[in-house]
Amino acid sequence: MSTAWRIGVDSSRCIGTSICAGTAPEHFRLVDGLSAPLADVVAPADVVLDAADSCPVEAITVHDVTDDRLIAPQE
C-alpha cells in the first residue's frame, strides 16, 4: 500500500478549468491561470484521485513515491 503520492501537473496541457482546485482545494490552486499542486508529495487521499480523474485534459498525474507507479489518471 502507498504511503505517499507525488502530484504532477503538466503546465503545457493544463487549460485552467479549475476543476482540480474546486475538487481538492487543499491540494491544488491556480497560479497565473494554471493548476499547481500545493505540495509535490502528499498522503494518499481519494480527493487527489478525484481531481486527477476529473481533469478534462489529463494534465494531473499521481505517482506512488516508492516505485513511481502511475496511480491516476485511470485509463
Image (cartoon, rainbow, N blue to C red):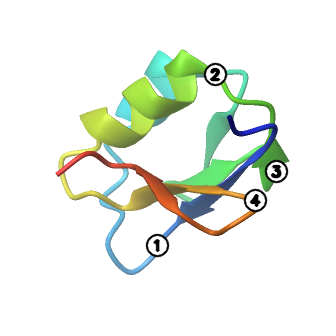
As helix, strand or loop, the secondary structure at mark 3 comes to strand
Q: Which of pointers 1 and 3 indicates the residue nearer the eye?
A: 3
Residue bearing mark 2: 45
Residue bearing mark 4: 65
Q: Position of residue 12 (x, y in %)?
A: 38, 81
- Residue type of the residue flagged with mark 4: Val
As helix, strand or loop, the secondary structure at mark 4 comes to loop
Residue bearing mark 1: 10
State which tag comes first along the sequence, 1 or 3: 1
Q: CB atoms at circles 3 and 4 under 8 Å apart?
A: yes
Q: Identify the residue shown where x is 80% and y is 39%.
A: 42
Residue 41 tag number: 3
- Residue type of the residue flagged with mark 3: Val
Q: Which of pointers 3 and 4 indicates the residue nearer the eye?
A: 4
- Residue type of the residue flagged with mark 1: Asp
CA neighbours of label 1 inside 10 A, class few (<14), some (14 to 19), many (20+): some
